[in-house]
Image (cartoon, grey):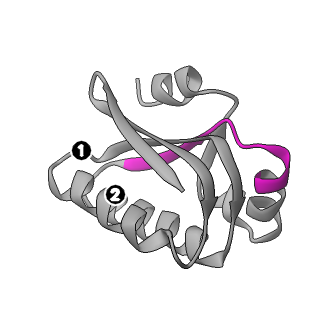
Amino acid sequence: MEFSATLHGAVTVVALTGSLDALTSPTLDAALSQHIADGRTHLVVNLAGLEYTSSAGLRVLLNAVKQARQQGGDVRLAALQAGVKKVFELSGFTSILKSFADVDAAVASFG
């Protein structure tokens, strides 16, 4: 898995590519926690390039949303692909995290 972060005003967009699993999730967990610790609590996770996520990946996102919400922020998802979206739906994560069709809509939702 690869990821990159870009700022869109007050919103940090983290784009994921590849597979998010037990091997790759610790790196993402540390990066998201650091963004939140640095005060960037409005996060959009762009999943357009994410091909697979395991339960370890779901835990990373759950951890990030808890941290962000404790500081008055939130984590939003953008551009879920069909296979990944199904994992989120089956695990109940679509009721925890707001999901948007694309990054622009997710960023605008913080408006």
Residue assigned mark 2 = 32
The quadrant in which residue 79 appears is top right
Q: Amino acid at mark 2?
A: Leu
Please tell me which residue is depicted at 36% across the width and 39% down the height of the picture. 5
Which image quarter holds the N terminus?
Answer: bottom right
Residue holding disc 1: 40
Determine the residue positioned at 49% across, 50% down: 2
Query: Does label 2 or label 1 sit earlier along the sequence?
Result: 2
The image shows residue 22, relative to residue 79, as above or below, that is: below
Q: Is residue 55 left or right of residue 37?
A: right
Label 1: element kind: loop
Viewer-nearest of labels 2 and 1?
2
For numbered disc 2, what is the local secondary structure? helix
Measured as percent of width and height from the top left, residue 8 is found at: 34, 23
Q: Which image quadrant for residue 56?
A: bottom right
Q: Position of residue 27 (x, y in %)?
A: 38, 66
The residues colored magenta run 74-84
**In-front residue for pair 14/105:** 14
Q: Residue at x 17, y 48 (%)?
A: 39
The residue type indicated by label 1 comes to: Arg
- For the residue carrying disc 2, how many other residues have a C-alpha within 10 Å: few (<14), some (14-19), or many (20+)? many
Q: Which residue corresponds to the image point at 78% horizontal and 52% vertical from the top-left?
A: 85
Task: Examine the image and state in which quarter residue 90 appears.
Answer: bottom right
**Any magenta on residue 51?**
no
Residue 25: give x, y in percent of width and height.
Answer: 48, 70
Mark 2–mark 1 Cα distance, whole angstroms, equals 9 Å
- Is 49 placed left or right of 104 in the picture? right
Residue 45 drawn at (x, y percent)? 50, 44
